[in-house]
Amino acid sequence: MKNMIVRSIVLLFAVLTPFLVVGYAMGIMPNFLQAVNTLNVIDVIWLILLGAMMLGVYWWLFYIEEEEEITEEFMELDRNHDGYISRDEAEGYLAEKFEECDADHDGKISRHDFELVMHH
């Protein structure tokens, strides 16, 4: 639940930040629209790069957090710490769909198999 709240706040921040920055610029900059009309190609490229960088940072934040959650969940399910989840260790959805989750059909779910399940 806590992770869902954090994700929602970060997503809200990511969506609202450009609007807040433009609003702030309009408030402090005289003749804002005239300044926008005088932008040259280099300025536009820098703005696009800045926007791409912001999106990259937010994506990276979510990706790293998701990978940490997957690692924690895998470690919790792998009770004997052998690097695999056996049929006896599987719980919930994983137990119900064990055969489908065991991609290489070796009777245990590897970390790679588990990541595939969690990402889809």
Image: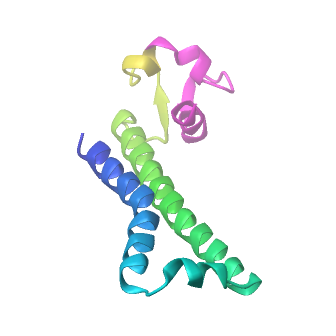
Residue found 39% across the figure and 46% down from its top: 69
Residue found 46% across the figure and 12% down from its top: 96
Say whether residue 109 is magenta.
yes
Residue found 37% across the figure and 76% down from its top: 24
Front residue of this view, candidates 60 and 87: 60
Q: Position of residue 4 (x, y in %)?
A: 31, 43
Compared across the picture, whether 53 is left or right of 44 comes to left
Residue found 37% across the figure and 46% down from its top: 72
Say whether residue 105 is magenta.
yes
Q: Position of residue 18 (x, y in %)?
A: 46, 66
Residue most extreme to the top: 96
Q: Quadrant of residue 41?
A: bottom right
Q: How is the image coloured?
A: rainbow
- Would you place residue 109 above or below residue 97 in this image? below
Residue most extreme to the left: 2
- Would you place residue 65 above or below residue 31 in this image? above
What is the span of residues highlighted in magenta in the rendered image? 96-120
Q: Quadrant of the C terminus?
A: top right
Q: Quadrant of the N terminus?
A: top left
Q: Position of residue 37 (x, y in %)?
A: 65, 79
Q: Position of residue 3 (x, y in %)?
A: 30, 47
Front residue of this view, candidates 68 and 45: 45
Front residue of this view, candidates 120 and 72: 120
- Would you place residue 35 above or below residue 14 in this image? below
Compared across the picture, whether 77 is left or right of 111 comes to left
Compared across the picture, whether 27 is left or right of 110 comes to left
Q: How many marks?
A: 0
